[in-house]
Image (cartoon, grey):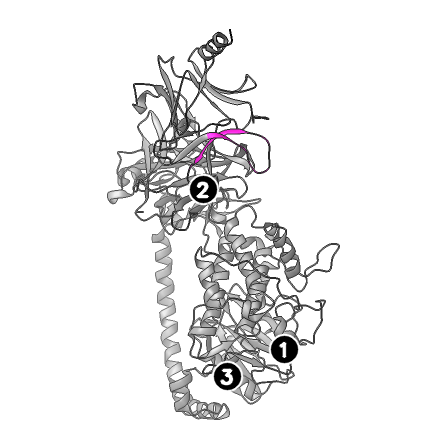
Amino acid sequence: MSFMLISFYLLFTYSKISDAADTITSSQNLTEDKTLISKNGIYELGFFNTGNSSKRYLGIWYKNIAVQTVVWVANGQTPIKDLSGLLMINSSRSKLVLSQNKTVIWSAILKRKPQNPVLQLLDSGNLVLREANDENSENYLWQSFDYPSDTLLPGMKLGKDLRTGLDRRVTAWKNPYDPSPGNLTWTMHVDNYPEPLILRGSKKFFRSGPWIGVQYSGQPTLQRHPIFEFKYFNDGNEVYFMFVLRNKSRLARMTVNQTTNSRLFFVWLEREQNWQQLTSLPRDFCDGYGACGPNGNCDAKKVQPCECLRGFVSKSPGGCVRNKPLNCKNDGFVKYISMKMPDTTNSWLNTSMTLNECREECSKNCSCMSYANSNISEGGSGCAMWFGDLNDVRVQPDGGVDLYVRVPASELENNRGHKWKIGVIVGSVALAISVLLLVLLCYRCRTQKNSKEKGYFAMLGYSSKEQKEDLELPLFDLSTIATATDNFSIDNKLGEGGFGPVYKGKLEDGKEIAVKRLSRSSGQGLNEFKNEVILIARLQHRNLVKLLGCCIHDEEKLLIYEYMPNKSLDSFIFDQTQRSLLDWSRRYHIICGIARGLLYLHQDSRLRIIHRDLKASNVLLDSEMNPKISDFGLARTFGGDQSAGNTERVVGTYGYMAPEYAIDGNFSAKSDVFSFGILLLEIVTGKKNSGFYCPNDSLNLVEYAWNLWREERALELIDECIVETCNLSEVRRCIHISLLCMEQHPQDRPSMSSVVLMLGSDVALPQPQQPGFFIGEHSHGGFSSSPFKSTSPSINGLSITVLEPR
């Protein structure tokens, strides 16, 4: 009787699959204790849970990667709450069914009823249901590639089947531990002129721009890559994007991440056993949808990135409107080079027209606001036209298209050129008169100038020959600087450091300068001035401020620097309004630039130099936000093998001093490394170390950061202005590096050459030890510090300070 019951049970229940199988049939099922493994062992299908959660999900992950990387989930919205999960083809062979305690929680309806169905996991990561004797992908009854989760794998389509309405879109997980759909979706907009979009909820968040033959118009140019290539397809029946691998042995994936609000592209590095991030979108402020509003043009390289297209003026609350009406017949077009195409919602496309035909067609239609080639390959072809407002336009210096924008006749280049020519003629006459006067003046002043040069450099302890051969530093007349600064007008005053005011000036040739004027009450003398002149004149690096010349006249001592239009770093990161202009990509660029500048001082310059006063106010920013280290008043030079020194009088700024310098007066290159660590932490957090306030505690910023690091909560340090757009792994790495730089003992801190390497690569980082906390007025174990503590953000923070040993 028992034998008969067992036989009956075996006949009428589904059998379990064998180990290492890649298929199940209609007579088999997949249970919690079994998995499917693709033929070559690349992917695995089974049940899993996330973190410490007891909820179970059916999904696909990489088989041979230690850290489970899930690429597809079936039941993200309906997790299984116990171990009763079961995947099977139902008895009528019409559905693929996932059940919990015999209750269906997820199912996939097949295109047609099969005769002999087989469910198979392929080496592509695609889970397919097909006829047992038919492996043609066109005949699949169902496939997981048609229903992506948060990941796009090679060969997967992102787009729509216009015949069936199938919408293949990628949707982010709510968070790393919850695979239910979040509100960030990567989809294909197919109306008029197709383009991929990332939506946050129902609102556009990021736009790739339409396909222009070689890439999308709003994405960075990607050189031919040995691993993969992008493809776009549109035949009127289907519109989709995909990427394929050139090297089939590699692994790559694209994901949408809710936590970072970004689309990420990863490639697996077998040797390093980790994922390398190739791209992250959006990249910057200008990538945010409609960053500058209708008819605005965004340029991420500018401090104020938004400006109106020509023929438009700003309006409130945002965007731009026409400054003059169009009259259709006499309108023309202004050419913008390397642009991301506008939003294609109100656009028209014809792939067979030439650019000239496109221009004619747009000119005839008074509603046409812009046109461009739709394909830039092979000299350009096709026509795209836009109607109404031009939305989400940006400068795309590493790609993009030539965009032609309709403007009134008065805005055309020819009209502007005519006015310019008149101005040139008038200016030339005035210039000729000025030259004649200058010749007479130069002849009169030459003798006086030569004698002054000898006198100036005799005061500095140099002969004119030494000055020419060694310093090669121009001398300025006091009258020249007085004229340039409008006689040191209060209107031209940029700020004031501990040793005197700084003024903005403009030389006769139009060059803008910053003039640092030694205050007579500062107590600084000729020797100190000489030391700073000699030191800075010998430094040449793109991340160090450039000294253009000096002036000595009686008791006046002036240093003339290149002018930094964006002032100092502290005026951005510590200002509630300005800091929002520094997105993460700009901050990271600034961090790397400061690191390279310090490396030059410590290792690559002719003199080994310790700055001793590295801080946010001593980092200046040029017109393109490139950082330049300034103010070498406290700097010390070392020769030969000397690498450290000692001083009896500690000078500097609270909040940036290394413990060994603050307490014992010992300084070295590692003292600068400590200051760099503080500065790096301030850039990431947007908070001052010296003025940091922690509720319910007296911690300074370093202690606060160390505590969060130990509790694995370091990402809570990130400035709220960059949380939504930053690369979290990159930011976490910077926090890690800052803690390494601030370790208590100098010998434990990395050199600046190591710091530059750590910032620029994925080298493994050692675990940091407890940092030194002796860095502020209220630090544990106080010390005597400089009276030159900064009380407010500086403007062009240039100051003259003593170089000689104290």
Q: Looking at the image, tell me whether mark 2 or mark 3 is earlier in sequence order.
A: 2
Residue 776 can be seen, yes or no: yes
Residue 408 can be seen, yes or no: no
Residue, x 65% and y 55% (percent of image)?
Answer: 707
Disc assigned to residue 325: 2
- Of residues 459 and 628, the one nearer the viewer is 628
Q: Looking at the image, tell me whether mark 1 or mark 2 is earlier in sequence order.
A: 2
Residue, x 49% and y 56% (percent of image)?
Answer: 586
How many numbered marks appear?
A: 3
Q: Residue extending furthest right? A: 696
Question: In the displayed structure, does residue 509 sit left or right of residue 803?
Answer: left
Percent x, y of residue 263 = 46, 41
Tell me the element at label 3: strand
Percent x, y of residue 422 = 36, 62
The amino acid on which the numbered mark 2 sits, given as a three-letter code, is Pro
Instruction: Please provide the residue range marked out in magenta.
Output: 46-63
Disc assigned to residue 551: 3
